[in-house]
Amino acid sequence: MIRFILIQNRAGKTRLAKWYMQFDDDEKQKLIEEVHAVVTVRDAKHTNFVEDPCGIALGPVGIIPDLPVSRSLAHLHNLFCHFRNFKIIYRRYAGLYFCICVDVNDNNLAYLEAIHNFVEVLNEYFHNVCELDLVFNFYKVYTVVDEMFLAGEIRETSQTKVLKQLLMLQSLE
Amino acid sequence: MLSTNGSRGGAGTHAWCGISSRSVEGVGCGDPRGQRMVVPSLKLQDLIEEIRGAKTQAQEREVIQKECAHIRASFRDGDPLHRHRQLAKLLYVHMLGYPAHFGQMECLKLIASPRFTDKRVGYLGAMLLLDERQDAHLLITNSIKNDLSQGIQAVQGLALCTLSTMGSAEMCRDLATEVEKLLLQPSSYVRKKAVLTAVHMIRKVPELSNIFLPPCAQLLHERHHGILLGTITLITELCERSPAALKHFRKVVPQLVKILRTLVTTGYSTEHSISGVSDPFLQVRILRLLRILGRNHEESSETMNDLLAQVATNTDTSRNAGSAVLFETVLTIMDIRSAPGLRVLAVNILGRFLLNNDKNIRYVALTSLLRMVQSDHSAVQRHRPTVVECLREPDASLSRRALELSLALVNSSNVRAMTQELQSFLESCPPDLRADCASGILLAAERFAPTKRWHIDTILRVLTTAGIYVRDDAVANLTQLIGGAQELHAYSVRRLYSALAEDISQQPLVQVAAWCIGEYGDLLLEGSCEETEPLQVEEEEVLALLEKVLQSHMSQPATRGYALTALMKLSTRLRGDSNRIRQVVSIYGSCLDVELQQRAVEYNTLFQKYDHMRAAILEKMPLVERGGSQVDGEAKESKEAQLSETALVSTEPQASKLLDLLDLLDGTSGDAQPPPPLDPSPGGALVHLLDLPGAPPPPPSIPNLRVFEREGLQLNLSFVRPSGTPALLLIMVTATNTSGADVTHFICQAAVPKSFQLQLQAPSGDTLPAQGGLPVTQLLRILNPNKAPLRLKLRLTYNHFGQSVQEIFEVNNLPVETWQ
């Protein structure tokens, strides 16, 4: 299951943040900063996956549920402590990092394809999309995300279908 | 495709309808005198431009605060026409990280409005601003309910989307029936969203599974990929949560197999194909569900075997999409009860992945191989060379996994080659991997060393390369190892001396070297050893080196202790005058370090008052017994030799008798006390094993053995090999007394060869009443991990007929099943 989707630029500004799990505002901010810190230092010789360095997944372990705010913050102090349960799959397109945070036992390669699929749809929809398109039309980007992903899962995989639906929605306004 | 210097024109043509008009609208600011000031409200685009135009963080904050004030005023006034624009601006500001909670109620108002534009912004706002922890979120439940039941697809879609993103448990319970109705609606657009919303609801409220289970069967017949995808996800979620659902859905395995087969062979629709693979996402999902259904279930696994083989061979892996599907197939094969040929196929696929240019694929291959190495060891061994290649990866996560996998693949046949590779890796690897690598090499060496000398060499090399990263007990292990290999003493001490002469900074190495030089200094000075080049060492050089170690600031206190003791030992080993040593020792008598000082003072006293005892005290050390780990046959025999050489004072005669017991059992046969004749007393009442009411009769798989009889006292052994632990043997010793007199103070002791582990449990008693009274039983637990032939020696002491008796004998005729 997807925990969150993040689009950031190299400077760390968030262009899109879609959360499929409950986090506090400050937790969200912290996560955004940490993802940025980890992902921007990696270059071409690194893989596109960021996991706990010890490697072997211990099976699906959920994040501690229902903790009061202060205690959950204490658990977020270390990026890799958090990432014992999840991992980040990211891809860089020009100046933007598209990051998906998933459970540890999910298929890395499949989500890498999902990111690429998503970017291709964006490209079609905005006609050679650039970062500014994402900035000025942020609400539309959210719509695209909601067409392709829902409830933390991949929803629609056909680019043509998604584009058709997006145009239909646009005509309603 | 994505460029950073974008044209603004693209943005302009997609301007939002609601705010495209350029006329100035007024926002009324509440003024107590009733005068309405008309202030132009910014369009969203303009606001974004203004924010981006701000040069500093402070400027940006200023712009935003001003705008927020306007927005707040607008909300207060309740202007319905432009509410959506205000909220949109607020959402943008929120995305940049500024607080926006005052917009929550506006979201509700917008959602309730009939206009689509309003609803759209309202729902987006709800998803971004409202979540479970806000109290206001429950208020939208009603609006969502209304929107779900009215017929407009787009609106239903919006509502479902919002529900699935931020729906709390209460909301889910309230709206479950609505969503269920939508599952069977004609419009596929809505059904798609409804299915995944159901997934979210189940995650929040597991009891709702009951509602969503029945429609799944019908939904599986869909041809629409989106719905199919959602349905499979829903079924996966149901199966993961409840074993009953899992059993229920095993029935659909054939159907799933059919769907996947159609996908792979004919290709459903071109619009779902990605890089030539038809809908890889759906394939991956189905494979995952098959994995869950086939786990631990023979029948389902069998149904899938052919299909998995087909997918594995037919998928085109030139692009990432195909590799993703193939990877998921491999994971599924590994997890279900698949045919062995299929498993080998899976490992080979992973091996192929390792050769791929794409490092992502290599990464997933290494991770999976690591999980498989225990269960399919021989299959993974075939790819060992490739794995070793991966050690040279620049990415740390890849090389770490390669290291772990390489260590897991070391066995007795490839240990030399592997250690060579790992050693060269150790020299060049990043620091955080060094500790693991070093301890891994040492562990592998310990388990698979072909010869003692190789073992010592390996440890030496590790210590010189990465001395500071080894674990603390490496020093102790090495000294014990050297001590045990008597034929290598000369060789070791020479090697260590040369290493020490070069570099005294690596503490573990210095410690071991100092110890060795102290123990075997005489061998060092002899000058000849066949295995290394001849090394002429003078006494003075040795002493100088040890003094250097003592004085160096790089030496830790423990190292200094070693050096000082070594110097002391040399005073007896070297033929020359020990004046120099005496001097050094007395200097350290006033050292600041308490440990060193104590040693120096004691040694000093040894020189002065107890010089006659010095030689005896500083003799060569006996081998220190290492707790727990396997010691091979060579070490055992040399240990026996050392034990007999040194003057071990055995305090009690009992203990020495037991020592003799042990000596006898350790391979050196024949010379010690012959066991007393074991013939049963000729005329005695040969009573068979009595039925023992107290002791539980063990299962009669191995025949019982009568091992001893004398004057009516009999000893019987019965054997049990528990099926769960093949190395374990349980022996129940039963002593019975059929004579006319009681047997008292009955003690039974046992001894086994060194490679076994013996545990005697407490006996049931120590008195055997006469005339076939209650027998005494005692349980022996013997662990035989090497499956070596069992030898057992028993010693009995008791009082009978007014005499104390002691019997020692070895048990002959032990059945083969006790140790095979």
Image: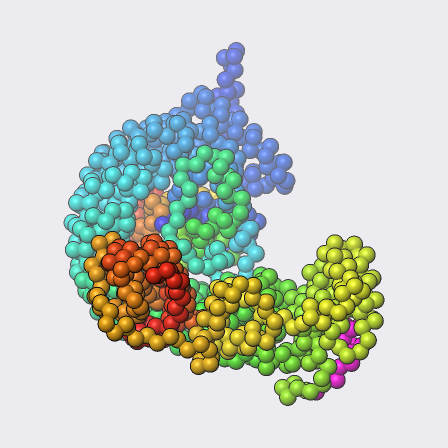
Taking the magenta stretch, the answer to whether it contains residue B544 is: yes
Residue B652 higher or lower than B205, as above or below: below
Picture quadrant of residue B135: top left
Q: Position of residue B111 (x, y in %)?
A: 34, 31
Residue B455: x %, y % from top left: 55, 76
The vertical placement of A54 against B513, above or below, is above
Q: Is residue B427 visible?
A: no
The residue sitting at 81% across, 56% down in the picture is B590
Residue sitting nearer the eye, B732 or B63: B732
Give B491 or A64, whichever is nearer the viewer.
Answer: B491
- Residue B624 seen in this snapshot: yes
For the rendered model, the colour scheme is: rainbow
Residue drawn at (77%, 79%), measured in percent from left and top?
A: B575
Query: Which residue reaches farthest front?
Result: B802
Q: Is residue A95 magenta?
A: no
Residue at image point 60% right, 61% down: B472
Position of the C terminus of chain B, as image quadrant, is bottom left
**Left or right of residue B744: residue B386:** right
Which quadrant of the figure has residue B664? bottom left
Q: Is residue B172 left or right of residue B581?
A: left
Q: Residue at x 43, y 48 (%)?
A: A5
Q: Position of residue B784 (x, y in %)?
A: 38, 69
| B366 up-or-down from B114: above or below | below
Highlighted magenta segment, given as a residue range:
B534-545
Which residue occupies the foreground of this view, B266 or B521?
Answer: B521
In the image, B73 versus B423, the foreground residue is B423
Query: Residue B736: image x %, image y %?
Result: 27, 61
